Image (spheres, grey):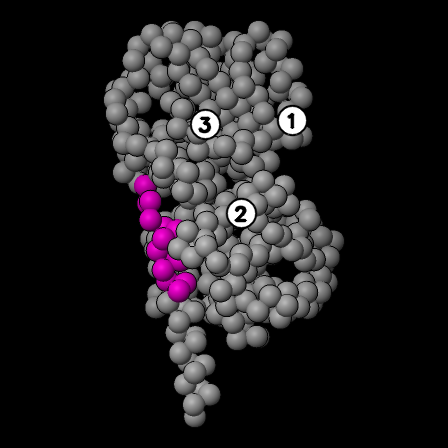
Amino acid sequence: MTIVIAAGGTGGHLYPAIAVAREFLRRDPSTRILFVGTTRGIERKVLAHEGFPLQCITANPLMGKSPVEMMKALVSLPVSLWQSLGVLKQQGADLVFGVGGYTSPAMLVAAFLRRIPGVILEPNAYPGMANKAVAPLVQRIFLAFESTVQWFDRRKTRVVGNPVRRAFLESSAVPSGPAKNGRARHLLIFGGSQGAKAINSAVLEALPLLGALKGGLMITHQTGEADHARVLAAYDQAGMSAHVVPFLYDMPTVLREADLVVARSGAMTIAELTVCGKPAILIPLPTAIYNHQLRNAEVMAQAGGAVLLPQAELTGAGLAKAIIDIFNEPERLQTMSRHSWEMRRSDAAETIVRECYDVIRRRHEASDSARAL
């Protein structure tokens, strides 16, 4: 069986697809997996690390871009569709799996034209244009949030949560109790796969104030490639020890060790936080299309697992106060951990793969019936 997965651009699109790919292979190691993406996203670097093949097509982002960039994206659509048709013909795909973004539409339209079943995953609380556009062409629509059902055909939707890599499930455990007074707290900071300069800057402003934490503080900070040198130099100048890296490949291990997380609120971040039961201070990306990160953060904050801090209100002093207040109240930290844990969905990948097998079976039965007539 051959599965073609159209995903990339950001970690939020790529990592749930990797989790699904791993589940396909766990169920049947003979399954062939091909990722389709572009050269402009993080998929080439990440998929090489994960050991999956990648084939690139010409595709450009459309939403939230300048008129010139939008025109460029529109012009590239016929090219990406032609390339996608070629990929599917060459691979003999049994299913196309899309996770939104600018790579998915061409592949799913090509699948429809070639009568190959297609499914999509919408990881955010508010759906993107790509998934809404191709939804009429696919056989299943997997959703992370119940509130998203209203935008799709209910007969095809399944609310499953966001699939996370099995390493998160194997490393997660029920929050066991308040952090012991006197031991160093572990603060994890990351701004998504590409980093977040606004968060980085606020953390650096907060460093002199964070020294007031009793028992000390351990910091792991993912900066993104572009801001790594600046942030690393600032920690050195402040005389504060921290593990500062451009990118975290082993997020399951790092997240397991964290007591509190400062992060953006992409869909995969929410899924990974909750499956590990981690409390968070969430700073939504204000420029995210449809403001979907704010909606994601609101879901977790309303459940009690996170504090929502809008970027418009983000200062070093304010961030330091939020961190110190949570760490200085062990019971509050534990309560947030429990509420985060209660949001977890640990079976999303298994459910998606099971449903995909059903979609493939139904398509084969329909083809057999048509040939018998």
Segment colored magenta: 344-357
Disc 3 residue type? Answer: Val
Q: Quadrant of residue 71?
A: bottom right
Callout 1 environment at 10 Å: few (<14), some (14 to 19), or many (20+)?
some
Q: Is residue 300 visible?
A: no
Q: Which of marks 1 and 2 is nearer the N terminus?
A: 2
Spot occupied by residue 108 in the image (x, y as percentages of width and height):
55, 65
List the residue tagged with mark 2. 14
Q: In which quarter of the image is residue 361?
A: bottom left
* Distance (Cα) linking label 2 and label 3: 19 Å
* Distance (Cα) linking label 1 and label 2: 22 Å
Spot occupied by residue 294 in the image (x, y as percentages of width and height):
45, 40
Q: Does residue 185 appear to the left or right of 91 in the view shown?
A: left
Q: Earlier in the sequence, mark 2 or mark 3?
A: 2
The relative height of residue 103 versus residue 192 in the rendered view (above or below) is: below
Residue at 48% across, 32% down? 251
Circles 1 and 2: CB distance less than 8 Å? no
Secondary structure of the residue carrying tag 2 is helix
Q: Which of marks 3 and 1 is nearer the N terminus?
A: 1
Residue at 53% across, 23% down? 221
Q: Which mark is residue 141?
A: none
List the residue tagged with mark 1. 227
Q: Nearer the viewer, residue 148 or 155?
A: 155
Secondary structure of the residue carrying tag 1 is loop
Spot occupied by residue 207 in the image (x, y as percentages of width and height):
52, 13
Q: Is the magenta stretch mostly helix, strand or loop?
A: helix
Mark nearer the viewer, 1 or 2: 2
